[in-house]
Amino acid sequence: MVKNINLIKIVILAIVQGLTELLPVSSSAHVIVAEKLMRLNPVSPEMTLLLVMLHTGTMLAVIVYFWKAWKNTFFSSRQVFFKFLINVCLATVFTAIVGVSLMLFVEKVLLHHVAHAEVEMIFGNTTFISIALATVGILILIAGTQEKKIPENRELGVKESIWIGAIQGLCLPFRGFSRSGATISTGIMLKIEKHTNEAFSFVLAVVLTPPVIIRETLRLFKTTTPINYIHYINPCLTGMVISFVVGLFALRWLSRWLSQGQWKIFGFYCIAASIILFFLSLKGF
């Protein structure tokens, strides 16, 4: 339980989150594996809330780091801003449609035999995580073959926003299906200009984070007594602050690495990680 995690474990989880958030390798999968290695239960309400708060920390770091670039790109004029806002809203709506539909499928079909089933119950399943990692790895490899064919001035439109939002919805129920890996890969295949593609992907993550926090907070409140809330919130806030600081430092060199155009490398990494995790799952990990 979160209230029993010492500061060292929180620091470790926050560092893992901070280092992997920008990379398309599923930071959630890495944090969940780290939790299991430290004998923590990643599917408990306390731990899923902690994971969301770690994401919040790195998302705040992303906002601080990229704010100037976003301001120059998406806030350069009223016309540009409203066009951008429409694209964000469309993408978010389709994320909700796909994501919620899949979550209901998991709860009502895959977990129909479990009383009070919740999609979070599969978050710690390493077999599911390995399959999700392999899937996004293949998607990244496919996109990597088209990375050098993108026109310099291809704009983001309605069709592209809908596709990216729908693909982002796949990440909601499946840990290991890297959100940034999937959305940026989709943008590459749709031939969206690189900097616009990456910026749009992280903006969507910022928009997605608050409703996920609300969901996990409500889930926590339903499963604990009011007197225990403070014991869960304090470690979560501590982890959020640490992941924010680590994320800021990591962004300084990770963004330079991403700009070198080696997208396929992350696909190979995801597939290799999925194979290792699959064999570990066979041994009961």
Image (spheres, helix red, strand yellow):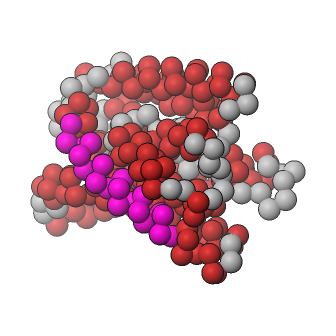
The residue shown at (55%, 68%) is 232
Q: Residue furthest right?
A: 113
Q: Which image quarter holds the N terminus?
A: bottom right
Q: Which image quarter holds the C terminus?
A: top right
The residue shown at (79%, 49%) is 111
Q: Is residue 110 visible?
A: yes
Place residue 240 in its image quadrant. Answer: bottom left
Would you say 97 lies left or right of 56 here?
right
Would you say 152 lies left or right of 29 here?
left
Q: Position of residue 276 (x, y in %)?
A: 58, 22
**What is the count of numbered marks?**
0
Q: Position of residue 243 (x, y in %)?
A: 36, 53
Viewer-side residue, 204 vs 222: 222
Q: Position of residue 233 (x, y in %)?
A: 51, 70
Viewer-side residue, 157 vs 130: 130
- Residue 246 inside the magenta-drawn segment: yes
Q: Position of residue 225 (x, y in %)?
A: 68, 77
Would you say 49 lies left or right of 161 here?
right
Q: Residue furthest bottom?
A: 227
Where is 164 relative to 244, above or below?
above
Place residue 264 in its image quadrant. Answer: top left
Viewer-side residue, 110 vs 217: 217
Viewer-side residue, 153 vs 13: 13
Would you say 203 lies left or right of 151 here?
right
Q: Main secondary structure of the magenta part?
A: helix
Q: Is residue 167 visible?
A: no
Please state the extent of the stretch shown in magenta in the rendering: 233-253
Place residue 45 in its image quadrant. Answer: bottom right
Where is 100 relative to 157, above or below?
below
- Residue 161 inside the magenta-drawn segment: no
